[in-house]
Amino acid sequence: MNTRKEQIDAQMQECIEKGFTATDPAGTVSFDQEDLAAYQVLFDTLKEEPTTGPSYGFSRAVIAKIQTRKDYAFMFKWNIILPLALLLSLGIIYLAAVYLNNGMANSMIRLIAGFKWQLVFAMTCFFMIQYLDQLLIKRRTIV
Amino acid sequence: MFNEREVIPRILKGDLHAFELLVKQYQQLVFYVIDKLVRNQTDKEDISQEVFIKVYSNLRHFAYKSKLSTWIASIAYRTALNHIRDHKQGSGVQVDVIMESFHFTEETPARLSEKKDLAAYINRLIAELPVAYRSVLTLYHLNEFSYQEIEQITGMPEGTVKNYLFRARKLLKDKLKPYITDEYTKRAD
């Protein structure tokens, strides 16, 4: 605030903030009355609340979004855990078959191994769908 | 009476009803901040919802070092700024603007007719201000935060807050004064 004019403006702003009105003669007589009136209108308007506000069901909409996110996070977790548990089980069965030299288990594993690339493809698709679903749902609930 | 020290622990335990109370308590605060900073009317409610989702996700980090309202307002402010940056809303993108070089857009007949409604006219002028000036005006006058709280919310030093507030008000007053002068002349006649 370098100039004298700016100093006067600063004093006027302070004066209005302290509750003097544009028509109050006490202590405000040295100010330009039109400046003071303009400031008064401005300060009054700045305090006015916007005519629009959040919608009636705003808080419920927020809670619904949070609940949706929680549900999806829960489902996502289980959709990952269950296939991983299946894979782990297959691995354990295979190791058990190797360890026990069980012919029947070995032939089952060989059968599964014959479809290994189809299985890898199916698993990859499954995890990709899970990931994309989570990604898109998350975005939809925010935007 | 809303007691944040009683409600926050309930929310942290997963009580969504308690969080709904918090939303109801602060929804106007958030909406006022978003309303003045974001120009696109349709985005305002979505951004306000996003603010509360962030509040919910980060509430465990709230350490009672400031008032809850200040903390929520800072999330609202940063969310609005991110939205403005992502959508590049004109002069609003620049947070630091040299005020001397700022000019309102030229008057148009439509805008002149708005002067009949002074409040609408002033709000239109405020909407044209750079985002930093709109922010301090809103936080100080509408949300009634102190200079120190605005510093916490926006990250601007207190001196800058005072300076922006002074310059924004002066600029608006200068724009408003010819209209007030007309009114004085009419009354004198």
Image (tube, rainbow, N blue to C red):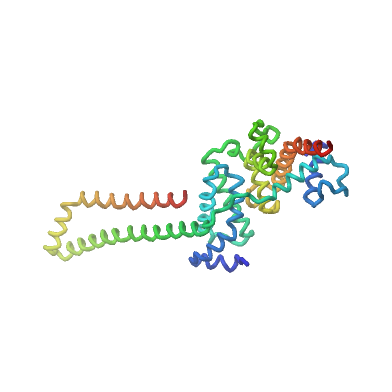
Q: Is residue A142 left or right of residue A80?
A: right
Q: Which residue lies at the image location 39% right of the left edge and 49% below the top edge?
A: A136
Furthest-front residue in view? B189
Q: Is residue A113 left or right of residue A80?
A: left
User: Can residue B150 be seen here?
Assistant: no
Compared across the picture, whether A142 is left or right of A103 comes to: right
Q: Is residue A24 visible?
A: yes
Q: Vertical placement of B169 versus A74: above or below? A: above
At a point 64% along the width and 52% down the height, the residue shown is B152
Residue B148 x/y as whole percent: 69, 53
Pick whichever, A48 or A1, lies toward us: A48
> Where residue B39 appears, x then y in whole percent?
57, 42
Quadrant of image for the N terminus of chain A: top right
Q: Percent x, y for residue A44?
A: 73, 48
Query: Can you tell which quarter of the image residue B24 is in?
Result: bottom right
Residue A120 lies, in percent from the top left, at 24, 50
The correct choice, above or below, for A77 with respect to B115 in the image is below
- Residue at image position (14%, 59%) is A108
Q: Is residue B9 above or below residue B182?
A: below
Total label count? 0
